[in-house]
Image: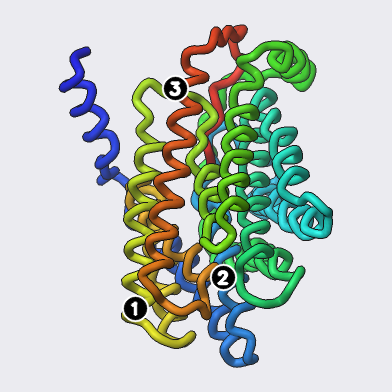
Amino acid sequence: MSGTNRAGQLARAVLAIDRTAPPAPRALAIGALGMGVPVAAGLLLGQPHAGFLIGLGAVLLAGGPAEPGTETSGGTGARLVGMALPALAAVAAATLLARLPAPDTARILLITIAALAVNHSRPLAAAAIRFNIYLVLGGSLLDGGPGHGGSAALIFGLGALWNILLRLLLDKGRPAAPAAAPARRAPTPAQRRTYFRRQIRTLAGWQFPLRLAIGLGIASLLRHAFPAHHYYWIVLTVALLTEVRIEPLPTKTLQRLLGTLGGVALAWLLFALASGPVALGIVAAILAALVAVARARSYLLYAILSAPLILLVLDLGKPVAAGLLIDRLVATLAAGAIVVALNLLFERLPLTAPATPRRAPPSGR
């Protein structure tokens, strides 16, 4: 394939919009209420920061139907609990690790161990990836987010419980979904354990955990090297950009990078136009509703809309200044450079993997 055709194919994939996705009034309601209700309650109780934290935790919990192969047996309630447990475990871990002398090192070690789960099965891989994202985000809230001291990550984790309650309430009275077609025979637990042990003895089984650990390590060094800047965003963006598989056409990585850049600029614009927690709460609820719809239609649009939500909570109460926008943009570009460089490096390594008994898990982000 020529360079021009390759670039054109990549551009079309990055900008693609799934126009077949049906209208999603329920997703709109979950997004708007997931953010709007906690924010309104926080404003009424004089705790706006707590309301925004809970709302963000509710919105970021992966929505929509489970990915094929990641379903949890036991119905909708059990599936939602299975989605929330990694998030709750992550914010609890983030709170405990923040008390250690070297929290960054401990956090990266735990993330590396969890990332090995991508070699086991799709459900466990999805849970591990969700755990890692919430762990990094919980650390960012403890490091530079709004008040509440060491409880910020735990308050954020309450959003996962609110997400479950909201979905169960909205599901009441809905007709049961039609039974899905029988899936192909899944590997047995013994086969998965055998495959996992085989994988972690190869470089292929470690390529994702190593790329993630090295990338987060470099990001952490940069953050501490420039303490006057808001560079924890490098750490969070590296965690978001690092995909399980190294793709020849890095569509999702480029979508996330471009979306984060656009989202940072959009966040600065929203902060400049909306002043006060009430106005920001309305903006956050609108963004949350749009995020819920964008997730199914365009990952690029989803990234553009979700970044301001995260930044809105991280930067709530901070003065709007050009320096803050510049810091976020520089951090995003630095994170993108780290991830791309590591992808190019590992792409050239002799990764030999045995045949996999299941498809590669999606990032879940």
The image position of residue 323, as x and y in percent, is 40, 67
The spot of residue 119 in percent (x, y) is 66, 23
Q: Quadrant of residue 287?
A: bottom left
Determine which residue is flagged by label 3: 344
325 relative to 72 in the view: left or right = left
Residue assigned mark 1:
272
- The secondary element bearing badge 2 is classed as helix
Q: Residue at x 39, y 48 (%)?
A: 296
Quadrant in which the N terminus is drawn: top left
Q: Is residue 6 above or below residue 271?
A: above
Contact (CB < 8 A) between labels 2 and 3?
no
Relative to 247, is 59 above or below?
A: below
Task: Judge left or right: residue 335 versus residue 357.
Answer: left
Res. 71 visible in picture: no
Q: Are marks 1 and 2 in contact (CB under 8 Å)?
A: no
The answer to whether the residues at label 3 and label 1 have Cβ atoms under 8 Å apart is no
Q: Which class describes the residues within 10 Å of circle 2: few (<14), some (14-19), or many (20+)?
A: many
Q: As rendered, which of 173 and 8 lies closer to the eye?
A: 8
Q: Please give the residue where the numbered disc 2 appears in the rendered image.
A: 55
Per the model, the C-alpha gap separating discs 3 and 1 is 38 Å
**Among numbered discs 1 and 2, the one appearing first in the sequence:** 2
Amino acid of disc 1: Ala
Q: Secondary structure under badge 3?
A: helix
- In space, the residues marked 2 and 3 are separated at their CA atoms by 37 Å
Residue 85 % position (x, y)? 73, 51
Q: Earlier in the sequence, mark 3 or mark 1?
A: 1
Disc 3 residue type (three-letter):
Leu
Pick the front one: 159 or 49: 49
